[in-house]
Image: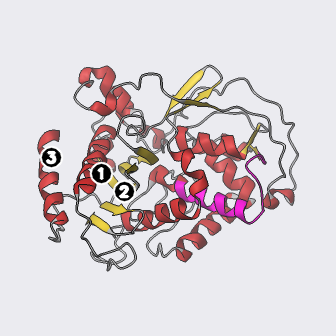
């Protein structure tokens, strides 16, 4: 069934790359493929449909933070303190105790590769002063970038009814990140982290497996389905694929890889760009909710970013090259401590007790809180 779906997608993509516009209700999930260097759109489908971004939200959190660094509000060696609020965020998470301190550099790596919800919240509170203040920054940046169909209420993408974006808006965000802050591109291409005795591999299964893959982020909550933004660079040409609402972690990787393959084969004659693509579809439509379709009949192990690992253990290994282990993966070590830089500007005015910069050996494991939301899969945003 998956191969048939990919084949049909291939036919659709081929028509689009040949200059035929295609928009069909057969495929409800949005798609956007574009050339990062030129901004030219190579493929799009339901690109203006509002969708729950899940942990793709963390790209906006990173962008706001990069902007804060550029403004002199903090530095990569600045302290990021885990608050009581951030420590209670559900998995995926690092599980550090309240009061733990790490560098912003390590916090960004944990947020982007482990997709740690607690660290994303800690970054937002330290950089913005509070979750609410940081969300205001997120929305202000979204408007400045022309992301007119996006609204953010938290820094990690955990489900909220009024937290949404579109494939087109997310493409604008990726373009801004990669063009304005090329020095941070290595964050998105990390294959895995070493945290104490634990190895935390990236949920982006293309990195280390797909030729030229260099980012960027995955995301999942039941309401969103499996989202992914994948990028790759070959012969100086960087393509970015945005795929929202796939039904499994492996499927989203297959589709992103297929999009990138066809993009690299394209002649580059398309004239529509991210900024010139006219909006289409139903204006201000409510975000699509995939909860019933994605999570109602799946076991808990299939309702997370680690779902593809579950597929591999379940005997499906070998059907997709993205389930194969990376031999000798390149791991980046992260830890607590070492924060010698200035306290973030917004955090300096907070009336909080400063915590000692004392490392904790290893993070606690991901034990989700037993709640109704967790049972429905909304406790995981990766």
- Tell me which numbered mark, 1 or 3, is placed earlier along the sequence: 3
Q: Position of residue 50 (x, y in %)?
A: 37, 66
The answer to whether residue 162 shows anywhere in this view is: no
* Residue for point 32% across, 62% down: 32
Q: Which residue is mark 3?
A: 5
Q: How is the image coloured?
A: secondary structure
Q: Which residue is mark 1?
A: 260
Q: Does the CB distance between marks 1 and 2 fall below 8 Å?
A: yes
Magenta segment includes 353: no
Which residue is more in the foreground, 18 or 128?
Answer: 18
**What crowding class fits label 3: few (fewer than 14 Cα within 10 Å), some (14-19), or many (20 or more)?**
few
- Tell me which numbered mark, 2 or 3, is placed earlier along the sequence: 3
* Residue for point 35% across, 27% down: 310
Position of the N terminus by quadrant: top left
Q: Give the Cα separation between the discs numbered 1 and 2.
A: 7 Å
* Residue for point 55% across, 25% down: 199
The answer to whether residue 310 shows anywhere in this view is: yes
> In the rendered view, does 341 fall on the left or right side of 271?
right
Instruction: Identify the element where label 1 is drawn.
Output: helix
Which range of residues does the magenta coloring cover? Answer: 59-79
């Amino acid at each position: 069934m998956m191969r048939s779906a990919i084949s049909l997608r291939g036919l659709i993509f081929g028509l689009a790359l040949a200059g035929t516009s295609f928009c069909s209700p057969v495929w409800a999930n949005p798609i956007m493929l574009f050339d990062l260097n030129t901004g030219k759109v190579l493929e799009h489908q339901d690109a203006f449909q509002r969708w729950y971004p899940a942990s793709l939200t963390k790209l906006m959190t990173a962008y706001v933070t990069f902007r804060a660094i550029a403004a002199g509000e903090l530095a990569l060696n600045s302290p990021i303190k885990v608050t009581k609020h951030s420590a209670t965020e559900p998995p995926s998470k690092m599980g550090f105790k309240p009061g733990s301190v790490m560098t912003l550099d390590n916090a960004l790596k944990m947020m982007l590769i482990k997709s740690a919800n607690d660290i994303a919240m800690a970054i937002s509170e330290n950089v913005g002063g509070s979750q609410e203040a940081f969300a205001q920054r997120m929305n202000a940046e979204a408007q400045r970038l022309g992301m007119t169909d996006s609204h953010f209420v938290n820094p990690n993408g955990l489900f909220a009814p009024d937290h949404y974006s579109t494939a087109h808006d997310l493409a604008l965000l990726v373009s801004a990140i990669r063009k304005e802050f090329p020095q941070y591109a290595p964050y998105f291409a990390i294959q895995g982290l070493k945290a104490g005795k634990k190895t935390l591999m990236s949920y982006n299964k293309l990195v280390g497996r797909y030729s030229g893959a260099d980012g960027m982020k995955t995301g999942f909550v039941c309401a969103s389905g499996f989202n992914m933004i994948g990028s790759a660079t070959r012969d100086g040409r960087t393509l970015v694929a945005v795929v929202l609402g796939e039904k499994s972690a492996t499927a989203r990787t297959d589709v992103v890889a297929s999009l990138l393959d066809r993009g690299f084969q394209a002649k580059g004659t398309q004239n529509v760009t991210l900024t010139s693509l006219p909006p289409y579809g139903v204006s201000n439509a409510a975000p699509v909710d995939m909860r019933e379709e994605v999570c109602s009949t799946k076991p808990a192990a299939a309702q997370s970013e680690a779902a593809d690992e579950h597929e591999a253990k379940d005997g499906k290994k070998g059907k997709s090259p993205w389930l194969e282990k990376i031999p000798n993966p390149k791991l980046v070590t992260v830890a607590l401590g070492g924060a010698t830089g200035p306290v973030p500007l917004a955090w300096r005015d907070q009336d909080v007790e400063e915590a000692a910069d004392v490392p904790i050996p290893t993070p606690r494991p991901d034990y989700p809180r037993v709640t109704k939301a967790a049972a429905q899969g909304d406790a995981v945003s990766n």
